Image (cartoon, rainbow, N blue to C red):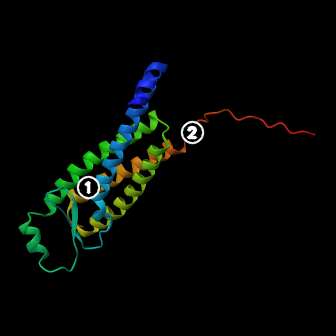
Amino acid sequence: MALMKLGETLGLSPNFQQLNMVRQELEKNEKIFEAYQNKFCEIAKLQDGDKLARDVSGVYYRHEKGEYFVQLRRWWTDQGRKQTFQQLDEDFTEFMKYLDTILTNLEITYEVRYRELAKKLKDLANSLMTGLYTLKNTYPYEKELICKIDSIILSLIDFKASLGEKLSIKLPQLTPARNRAFSE
């Protein structure tokens, strides 16, 4: 607070406020990332034949192939192919909006922490794609579910391509490079 008051007397308040807003938005986006990472962690761990389900808190879990009473548990918790389709559609629609927000922020700011967050998102996208390919093999005859999974994978690939373009941009130097003077 004292720093803000000092900034006002020096005429720097708008800059401090803008930096504070960027920092707050970055912290909010980092928390959202952690929530998505927690929500989707089991998707990355899927093995052939595993079934995917979501609990009431919205976090995904797996029914591993070969477990006892998988069909009964899935019936009891009202988990099935149609619910998996609906849940993937809901969650990944929101996730794609979040990814678009991150890409937009990367266009606006050169904040290093945003670039680090983007790299973490790229790693998350890679692990999700691996798990989604595995899930696709679990339901070979469910055309709608396979199309939804393919759509999600293509969206993740598109995000990674856009992210690669944004991260390949060199950061501007704050101080101009000086030529060194060598004595003879």
User: Dot 2 surroundings within 10 Å: few (below 14), some, or many (20 or more)?
Assistant: few
Task: Write the residue at 67% across / 32% down.
Answer: 176
Mark 1 / mark 2, whichever is N-terminal = 1
Pointer 1 residue: 147
Pick the residue in front: 142 or 18. 18
For the N terminus, give its image quadrant: top left
Task: Write the residue at 22% across / 74% down.
Answer: 64
Left or right, 15 with reference to 155: right
User: Dot 1 surroundings within 10 Å: few (below 14), some, or many (20 or more)?
Assistant: few
**Residue 30 drawn at (x, y percent):** 36, 47
Q: Compared with residue 176, is residue 147 higher up or lower down, i.e. above or below? A: below
Pointer 2 residue: 171
* Residue type, label 1: Cys
For label 1, the SS is: helix
For label 2, the SS is: loop
* Residue type, label 2: Leu
